[in-house]
Amino acid sequence: RVSLGQLTLVLGLLDSLNPCAIWVLTFLLSLLAHTRNRKKVLLVGGTFVVVSGVVYFAFMSAWLSLFNVIGMHKAITIILGGVAIVMGLINLKELFFFKKGVSLMIPDSAKPKIASRARKILSEQNMLLAFVGTAVLAGFANVVELGCTVGLPAIFTQVLPSRGLGT
């Protein structure tokens, strides 16, 4: 009953509250704020956003291909809905019991590696190396955070074939 545009907007807004993405973006923005170099801020920030979008697109394309191959089944819809609800409850739990029990956040063990790479990128004087480093960091961070966000993109891509949208 909901238009594809409305569904896209709602799921996009819900997915933007991803605790993993928020940590990486907040950390990167806090480092960028201290560079005082607009060119580097635009290059690093823009590259991070674009590469994140490309990784997300690839991830969702893989889901869409899978659903096109296996077809639409009510059981899959129910399972994906259940996964999304469980993931949402786990993320909601973080508001009240931060890092207690099961968590979908970036593991603390991965954060120093991400932070170290981000600092190296921002201290890099060669803009080409900063661009490449940012692309690698964005790819790595997005792969790590896929565990936080697997449910909503899967639901969205599962809906696309049901709306008659092919590959």
Image: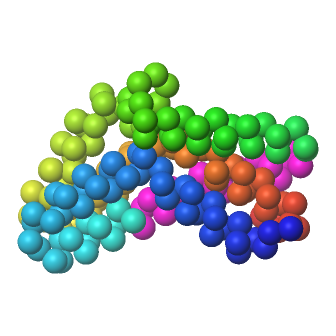
Task: Residue at 66% x, 67% y: name it.
Answer: 8
Residue 154 located within the stretch drawn in magenta: no
Q: Nearer the viewer, residue 108 or 135?
A: 108
The magenta span reads 50-72
Please determine whether, in this image, residue 16 is positioned above or below residue 112. below
Task: Residue at 43% x, 40% y: name it.
Answer: 95
Please determine whether, in this image, residue 124 is positioned above or below residue 143. below
Residue 161 image-quadrant placement: bottom right
Task: State the residue lying farthest toward the front.
Answer: 96
Residue 156 position in % (x across, y down): 71, 57
Q: Is residue 65 visible?
A: no
Residue 30 image-quadrant placement: bottom left
Q: Nearer the viewer, residue 148 or 87?
A: 87
Q: Nearer the viewer, residue 159 or 86?
A: 86
Residue 69 located within the stretch drawn in magenta: yes
Residue 35 position in % (x across, y down): 10, 66
Q: Is residue 117 visible?
A: yes
Residue 109 position in % (x across, y down): 30, 28
Task: State the residue lying farthest toward the top.
Answer: 101
